[in-house]
Amino acid sequence: MKLVILDRDGVINHDSADYIKSAEEWQPIEGSLEAIAKLSRLGFTVVIATNQSGLARGLFDLDDLEAMHSKLTEMVETRGGNIAAIFYCPHGPDDNCSCRKPKTGLVDAIEVEFDVCAEGAPFVGDSLRDLQTGLAKGCQPILVRTGKGEQTLAKLAGEPLSGLENTPVFDDLAAAAAYIADHFG
């Protein structure tokens, strides 16, 4: 199985400091849906791992989250692709759970669900938490400049973190997907 793990907010869809709280607010970044469809058509199992602390904060409920994910899934399917699964952490930053990135619980769950080892799989994110999660599980962290990507890149330039020195950086998911297709196919 060729596994690809993607963060959601800031990678696939536009992010907001006020959180994405509804399907109406959920808007894809140009080219991201086509990139997922392309990876899917190339035989990659595309899985999303996303922190959704807005649930714990009471900003939206499970029905709202499911509506966002249905919108995402349907939009990818209309482009000929498939999202194998969406894993999310519903907890807040102070809940001390094992699934909130940068902890590895979401990737652990992906491994169990698909009976696969995530080691070596590309993990695309826009935040330091995403990169740290991928690194902790032996994935290949990939940074996109969309969302919080530019801020993350600046942090890494200011204080490089061991293991992330050679992280590939791309303008967006479309460019990252082209790299993944060439290097992980």
Image (cartoon, helix red, strand yellow):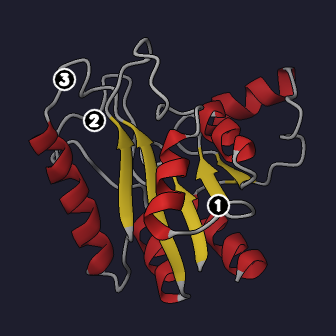
Label 2 SS: loop
Q: Earlier in the sequence, mark 3 or mark 2?
A: 2
Front-most of residues 26 and 185:
185
Cα distance between the residues tagged 3 and 2: 9 Å
In this rendering, would 167 be left or right of 63? right
The label on residue 20 is 2
Q: Which quadrant: the N terminus?
A: bottom right
Left or right: 39 in relation to 132: left
**Residue 89 image offset from top left, x and y in percent:** 38, 36
The quarter of the rendered structure image containing the C terminus is bottom right
Category of crowding for the residue at label 2, using alpha-carbon neighbours closer than 10 angstroms: few (below 14), some (14–19), many (at least 20): many
Dot 2 amino acid type: Ile
Residue, disc 3? 59
**Mark in the foreground, 1 or 2:** 1
Q: Is residue 152 visible?
A: yes
Determine which of the numbered discs, if any, sits on residue 118 in the image: 1
Give the alpha-carbon distance from disc 1 to disc 2, as whole Å.
Answer: 28 Å
Q: Is residue 27 left or right of residue 108?
A: left
Q: Of the two numbered discs 1 and 2 on the same chain, state the one appearing first in sequence.
A: 2
